[in-house]
Amino acid sequence: MLRRDRGRSAWLAAALTGSVLCGAPAGAAPVSAPAATPVAAEAPAASRQEVASAIAGAIVDDMTTAERASAVVMGHVGGTDPDALGAYVREGRLGGFILMGSNVPKTPDELRRITDALDGPTGTLPPLVAVDEEGGVVTRLPWDDGPAGTQLQRQDPDASRAAFDARGGLLEDVGISVNFGIVADVGTRTSGFIRPRTLGGDATAAAERVAAAVAGERPHAFSTLKHFPGHGAAAGDSHSAIPETAMPVEEWRADHAPPFESGIEAGAELVMTGHLRFTAVDDAPASLSPEWYAILRDDLHFEGVAITDDLGMLLSSGEGRYADPVRNAVDAITAGADMALMVAGSNAGTAGELADGIAAAAEAGDLPPERLEAAATRVVTLRVLASGLLDGDAFEPPRG
């Protein structure tokens, strides 16, 4: 896994005694942990997940509502100027940044300079730095020539493990902590645009390869399963519409849930919710559906970070009720998402607008403050783990 050797011991001591800045601009007040936090004494007996959660809880306790709202937004702007990109994240206090093709220069060394700038100065908690790196048709790093779903569907699961071990290594080398790269959708005959990107044409085949892909990637980067509850169940492209299916929940559990279950069991740290509608469950797309987040948590026992697919895609659906990106972000966090992602249709001010809207909803009581606190704590926990502060010689991410 990516290790940022940036005075990690001193930083951790500061985190436990109350002087950590969570991506704050120069001159900002520190985010302090309660003096009674007993983490340091218990660390040898506690799991890395427990230690990270305790640190995150202390940090989030001292955050304002506005800071918590910024922490649950993953933003994006184009360009390859490291200083400009770093300033964008720090000034917005964003919880994450997604690298798209417009952010990727020609060489790994140049990209590493960008991710170093995104991490910010020593003494600040680095954001999550993410990328869509599936391989094949969804490849951001031009030097990634490894096999993708089209090839891996026809090979045994060990090939998926090897492919994502290698792919994860490429991400680790350039300082990327999160990969939105493991497609857990089932590639059925009716699954349309997603089929070539999937790892299997039936639930069993997909589940085996998804678990193997997570196992291969885990030593290097945090894995994301997408697009829950599964684009294979509905025809149509969610980049331009909201695909819809009347599939009964029992059929979904048998035919589309297994890859997500196996990926969670294998340790995937994130699940990305898709913009597709299961009318037997909810009229809202899954990304905005409390029912689907409840199924993810209660039935699939996922405890990691739930992030939306690009909320900008909803703007292209033609459905007026999803024409307001701020409303979509508020609804997503309220429903159970931990992080709102927006790329399409966004500009340099969009992430800040989403954060402002989330904060306003929490202040007004429309978004329960405890829901925002829980979301921010999950995101900050992952940031602590991604920072490498708790690592020894080897990295072992928490189970999902």
Image (cartoon, rainbow, N blue to C red):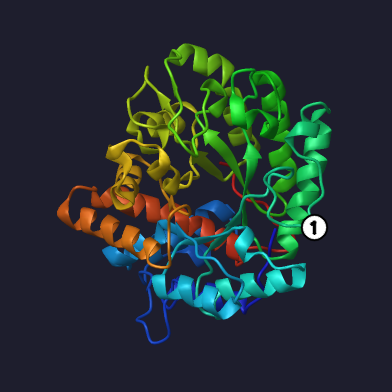
**Outermost bottom residue:** 27
159 displayed left or right of 96: right
198 displayed left or right of 386: right
- Mark 1 highlights which residue? 143
Q: Position of residue 212 (x, y in %)?
A: 74, 35
Q: Residues within 10 Å of mark 1 (few under 14, many from 20)?
A: few
Q: Quadrant of residue 231?
A: top right
SS for callout 1:
loop
User: Is any atom of residue 7 visible in this view?
Assistant: yes
Quadrant of the rendering where the N terminus is positioned: bottom right
Q: Amino acid at mark 1?
A: Trp
In the depicted structure, whether residue 155 falls above or below residue 308: above
Q: Quadrant of residue 349?
A: bottom left
User: Is any atom of residue 43 visible in this view?
Assistant: no
Asked whether 256 or 145 is in front, the reply is 145
Q: Quadrant of residue 178?
A: bottom right
Q: Position of residue 14 (x, y in %)?
A: 48, 77
Query: Measuring 77% from the left and 56% from the top, which residue is drawn there?
Result: 169
Quadrant of the rendering where the C terminus is positioned: top right
Query: Measuring 41% from the left and 32% from the top, which residue is drawn there?
Result: 286
